[in-house]
Image: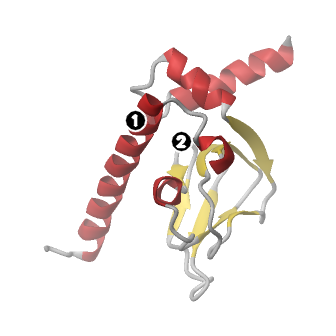
Amino acid sequence: MEALDALQSLKKAVAGIDFFRDFTDAEMAHVYHNGHFEICKAGETIIREGNVDRTMFVLITGAAKVIRRFAPEKVLALLKPGTIFGEIEFVSRQVRSTSVIALEESLVFQIEEKHYSDLPPEILVKIQQQAVKLLLERLEMIKLATGYDG
């Protein structure tokens, strides 16, 4: 019973993230069925730069950093619980442009490529819409941080 309660708590944590806020309970059931939770140890690579895959991640607990191979000492971003990452490659099949490393033991929810096609079309559309919205928000943050006015 305790494990079932823990799983329900994890599912509520995922459903409460802005990215999934507009998903119905039935749509979230599809998402859970086609994804899985994984514990990553401190220092473990969650995403490896240069890989090609269509896995999207939700950081449930813990913390992670985003780095690039050309400047591994420079942290491009710090990820906290509730952060979605890997969404660009999830919808576009691009090569991973960064690596994501767990800074501490972290729990992530993953939706993998092999299950992507099993999702109903309406869920795929919502994921793509949310990914575009997220990318636009990140672009705006970059513009503000760099002073870009174009």
Relative vertical location of residue 16 with respect to residue 4 in this rendering, above or below: below
**Residue holding disc 2:** 82
Relative vertical location of residue 60 with respect to residue 146 in this rendering, above or below: above
The quadrant the C terminus occupies is: bottom left
| Labels 1 and 2: the sequence-earlier one | 2
- Is disc 1 placed on a helix, strand or loop? helix
Mark 2 packing: few (<14 Cα in 10 Å), some, or many (20+)?
Answer: some
> The residue under label 1 is which amino acid type?
Lys
Q: Position of residue 35 (x, y in %)?
A: 67, 37
* Nearest the eye: 129 or 100: 129
Q: Position of residue 95 (x, y in %)?
A: 55, 71
Find residue 30 and report its image quarter.
top right
**Residue holding disc 1:** 126
Relative vertical location of residue 149 with respect to residue 103 in this rendering, above or below: below
The quadrant the N terminus occupies is: top right
The extreme bottom residue here reads 70
